[in-house]
């Protein structure tokens, strides 16, 4: 039990410190996936059976970034809760994790 809690705390700390970089990486991957979809549907012809690269791209995205997206949602929710309940703690969190300033 204690080992599991330590691992979760370690992962949460990782996502807190790297929030901005991970979010940018996910947004770039989504943009790339959208570009793939646009080019695919513009070249689609009626040739019977075809594989769907869009579906493959979505599945690959979920495989690569699914866990990161879930953790970013947890971090966003954490920021929202702390912002609503304790403004000073929220400012501290922003300085320490988001702006990476010494505390």
Image (spheres, rainbow, N blue to C red):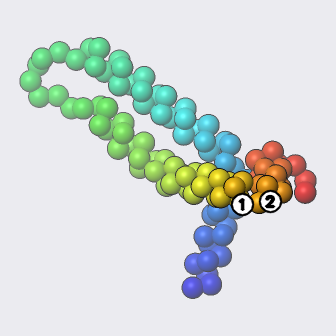
The answer to whether residue 20 is left or right of residue 70 is right
- Residue drawn at x 36%, y 36% as measured from the top left: 57
Compared with residue 4, is residue 27 higher up or lower down, i.e. above or below?
above
Q: Residues within 10 Å of mark 1 (few under 14, many from 20)?
A: few
Q: Is label 1 in a helix, a strand or a loop?
A: helix
Q: Residue at 67% across / 42% down in the picture?
A: 21
In the image as oriented, which residue stretches furthest toward the bottom? 1
Residue shown at 60%/42% (left/top)? 23
Q: Where is residue 58? Give x, y as percent.
A: 36, 39
Task: Measure the C-alpha gap from mark 1 to mark 2.
Answer: 9 Å
For mark 2, give the secondary structure.
helix
Residue 62 image offset from top left, x and y in percent: 41, 47
* Front-most of residues 94 and 83: 83
Say left or right for 44 vs 30: left
Do we see residue 39 in this rendering? yes
Q: Position of residue 93 (x, y in %)?
A: 78, 55
Residue extending furthest toward the left:
48
Query: Image quadrant for the C terminus?
Result: bottom right
Q: Which residue bears the numbered disc 1?
A: 85
Q: Tell me if label 1 and label 2 are in contact, CB under 8 Å.
A: yes
Q: Which residue is mark 2?
A: 89
Which residue lies most toward the right here? Answer: 102
């Amino acid at each position: 039990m204690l080992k599991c809690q330590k691992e979760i705390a370690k992962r949460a700390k990782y996502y807190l410190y790297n929030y901005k970089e991970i979010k940018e990486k996910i947004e770039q991957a989504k943009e790339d996936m959208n570009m793939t979809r646009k080019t695919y549907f513009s070249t689609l012809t009626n040739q019977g059976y075809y594989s769907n690269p869009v579906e493959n791209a979505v599945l690959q995205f979920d495989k690569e970034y699914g866990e990161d997206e879930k953790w970013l949602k947890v971090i966003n929710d954490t920021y929202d809760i702390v912002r609503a309940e304790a403004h000073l703690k929220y400012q501290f969190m922003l300085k320490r994790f988001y702006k990476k300033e010494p505390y």
